[in-house]
Image (spheres, coloured by chain):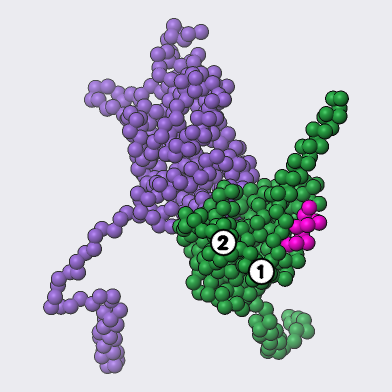
Amino acid sequence: MATSRIARPLARRLNARHVLSTQATPLRAFSYALPARSEQPPRTTHFGFETVPEDVKQSRVASVFSSVATSYDTMNDLMSLGIHRLWKDHFVRALDPGINPLIATPGAPPLSILDVAGGTGDIAFRLLEHAGRVHGDNTARVMVADINPDMLAEGRRRAAGTPYLSQGRLEFVEANAEVLSMVPDASVDIYTVAFGIRNFTNIRKALAEAHRILKPGGVFACLEFSKVGNPVLDAVYKRWSFGAIPLIGQVVAGDRKSYQYLVESIERFPSQTEFAGMIKEGGFLLPEGGGWEDLSMGIACVHKGIKPVEEKVRAEEPVKAEKPIYIRPSNPAQIPY
Amino acid sequence: MTVNLAIPRTSSVVLRLTRQCQCAVRANPLAGQRTFSVLNRPTPNYEGHVPLTPIERGALAISSAIWCFFDPTRADLIAALGEATAQPFPITRLRDAMLRSPTGRRILRDRPRITSQSLNLPYLRSLPANTVGRNYVEWLDREGVTPDTRSSVQYIDDAECAYVMQRYRESHDFYHALTGLPVVREGEVALKAFEFANTGLPMTGLSIGAVATLKKAERERFWSVYGPWAVRNGLQAEEVINVYWEEELESDVEALRTRLGIEKPPDLRAMRKAERERRKRERQEREAGLRS
């Protein structure tokens, strides 16, 4: 008993000394001059598994995509064994773009879609083709924005084989997704980004820009690589990604480094729930199920978000939602057929 | 419930295993290297080093060999094939050959690199016509290549062996100048045969498979003239990897060849030109005969 009365405070003091001695820089009681703080370190972000300053990432990503631009489709086919075409088809079909002109409000502006980081035009062509074939919509417009001029050049080359360029429904613009200064506020119906968002320097800034330019009720849709849930498939997938893909890049394209970056950037991208959380924090409403849909057991994932419609509350009038674009006019005289 | 599996006592098993391991460590040069997967590669040993697993190495060797056979202009793939097949023994043999020679040891200590910056090309053009440097730069100009087209070594694990491979790759153009073989497919195959006989790198041996892609006359020339020349000279000559090219730029080419023990092969460009002219003449005679 007596020993514990002595031992416990003694132990406490000993522990305290022990704690003090493990501090990195013990405070000196007589001098409280704080060490001069070094300059704020530059903000860094990740480039694959490397950590780089933010201003450097953009140029490094640009150089990766310049070097892969011409063999981009071959590489996608080899890396995903051709399945990337199915993913893109599903992405566009699930979005279901297009306003049937027979039921559209007369005088309404055509459907406006912005495809970001879609340089080679894969998604843009699918969107326009779907709108025309399924809804008979031949006025929908797509603007393809990409940060890399080589990818855009490749897209323009492919667009030459389609009628959309001459109809003025397709334009290619060099722009950074975080600063879309040429797009006015609330002017876009659908914002799509396919396999591009993991390369952005600051994803939240891009989400904020998307929120700005979308019309209320507009849809943000993102197709991206994501985390595989099944552990067995995940083990196989990771070994394929880190072993086979850089090797294929070396043999087919002569560029191991770019493909190593691509698989590392896939690994660094947030998981389905994390990214859905980021979209929600960006001010979007998530459809049911968290707003995401796994493709190929999680290898790819479609995330969607909807910009909420502002509710104008007035004292005397009841709350009226903004007229959605697909509604059939109630006045039969307005139906053109 | 006990099961008697007739397993010998643990201690004797362990003792036998450790003795086997010890023997393995003593005899096997590959022991002591930890295995890794593609998900946790070890830290690189030098700038640009990419450690490969055995499966990756095999896949790289096979796929690059097949791709190079159909597209021999992919120099980076030929380099990758060389690196994938050089370990563990061929490249260490070459490194040991360098260590056995005093000049080779100096090269390994200095580690000079051959680039368009390290060689003063205008100065080389001003040298007399019989010098190694002048021959080299004339050859570069005639074939339209520069010393900068060589890719860096990535897949060889030991840093010194990686330098040996890099030195071999950069000296390849000097071997062209030394032997006078042109950069056409036929000349490259003949030079690769010489290098295989001299350095023993498997990639050079595999490159002889490109003989199957040569035309009939070229193939006949290879089997009758250049192949035997390459084997004879490669085996009897000194190791060309040990030549300190930066110091030999002003020496006479013939003297260097004599010193190394290499005969000059018949001029391939002249032979090809003569062959072309002979065929043209025959064609003209045939057409004249048909018309008359």
Left or right of residue A292: residue A42: left
Residue A66 highlighted magenta (yes or no) = no
In the image, which disc is placed on residue A31?
A: none
Left or right of residue B143: residue A323: left
Q: Spot the residue most to the top.
A: A333
Could you tell me which residue is drawn at 27 percent across and 93 percent down? A2
Q: Which residues are magenta?
A: B221-230
Q: Which chain is purple?
A: A
In percent of width and height, residue A329 lies at: 43, 14
Residue A146 in view, yes or no: yes
Identified by mark 2, the residue type is Thr
Could you tell me which residue is drawn at 53 percent across and 63 percent down? B249
Near-viewer residue (B284 or A45) = B284
Which of the 4 quarters of the picture holds residue B153?
bottom right
Residue tagged 2 = B131
Q: Which chain is green?
A: B
Secondary structure at numbered mark 2? loop
| Location of residue B47 with respect to A167 vertically, above or below | below
Which of the 4 quarters of the picture holds residue A1?
bottom left
In percent of width and height, residue A332 lies at: 45, 8
Left or right of residue A108: residue B79: right
| Location of residue A74 with respect to B69 vertically, above or below | above
Could you tell me which residue is drawn at 79 percent across and 33 percent down? B284
Q: Earlier in the sequence, mark 2 or mark 1?
A: 2
Subunit ID for the residue under disc 2: B
Q: Spot the residue most to the bottom.
A: A2
Could you tell me which residue is drawn at 63 percent across and 75 percent down? B97
Near-viewer residue (B254 or B20) = B254
Mark pair 2, 1: CA separation: 14 Å
Judged by its main secondary structure, the magenta piece is helix
Residue tagged 1 = B258
Near-viewer residue (B34 or A138) = B34
